[in-house]
Amino acid sequence: MAVAVDVRLPTVLRPEAGGQSTVTVKGSTIGDVLRELVSEFPGMSGQLLNEDGSLHRFVNVYVNDDDVRYLESLDTPVKEGDEVSLLPAVAGG
Amino acid sequence: MLRLPRDLHLQMVAHCISGLPDEACGLLAGDASGGTVARLYPTRNAAASARVYSVDSRDLLHADRDAERNNAQLIGVFHSHTHTDAYPSPTDVEQAPDPDWHYVVVSLRDTHPVVRSYRIAGGRIEEESLVVLGQPARADVAVTV
């Protein structure tokens, strides 16, 4: 069942959401939440999901304290009261 | 310009040395407009590699939240180069997450660590001054560019 969850945005994505640091979107999985975000704020599209719908490798997505890559990725369920956080992955060589 | 208090500068270099033979990494927090580092977060290198680094995702989340609790925000990242110059690699440029960030590279190639700071935006690398606050005024230890 779709629930409303708060999504914390990193500073680089805030301009795409009118400067908001947290937005509320509905979904029952992380995939739903990200697709809903992209549909509401199209400027985020290429930064969250790949064209094939998979999770972009340069973004980290968390449900509360856990990285969804260590859970069920886009199929990770969200429930009422969960906080979703997005952060750009920090990596290099 | 990036300003780094001396104790944090030492902590950063020590974290890089303790990470050998792998690359080490960490995050810098402060006031975005001022360019002064107020907090430094040594993090794990999830890649555990001498050639690449990836800030452990949970360490990244914890640093971001801690910075926010202290009225600061993440303003940059540091990492070591174990066998090359203190200059961003093509991978560093490709994966630079934020054009407003400061990118500090600590080279451990030579006997003495070499620390330099850069801005990376739109694929372009620009070196910036790095000032160590509280550094003894001796020419042979100055790291200002």
Image (cartoon, coloured by chain):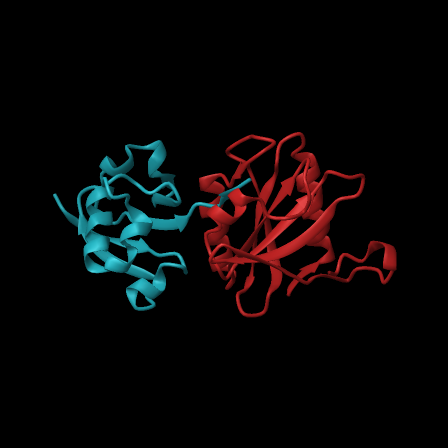
Give how far across and how far down residue B141 sits, in percent: 83, 54
Asked whether, in this view, residue B76 is left or right of residue B1, the answer is: left
Count of marks placed on residues: 0
What is chain B's hue in the picture? red
Asked whether, in this view, residue A72 is left or right of residue B18, the answer is: left
What is chain A's hue in the picture? cyan
Say if A75 sits above or below A87 in the image: above
Which residue is pictured at 79% across the width and 60% down the height?
B135
The answer to whether one can see residue B72 in this image is: yes
Which residue is pictured at 37% across the width and 39% down the height?
A66
Give how far across and how far down residue A74 sits, in percent: 25, 38
Say if B90 sits above or below B103 in the image: above
Give how far across and how far down residue A5 sits, in percent: 24, 52
Asked whether, in this view, residue B59 is left or right of residue A49, the answer is: right
Which quadrant of the figure contains the N terminus of chain B?
bottom right
Which quadrant of the figure contains the C terminus of chain B?
bottom right
Residue A30, quarter of the rendered image: top left
Which residue is pictured at 47% across the width and 52% down the height?
B64
The answer to whether one can see residue A78 in this image is: no
In terms of depth relative to the viewer, which is nearer, B105 or A87?
Answer: B105
Say if B112 sits above or below B134 in the image: above
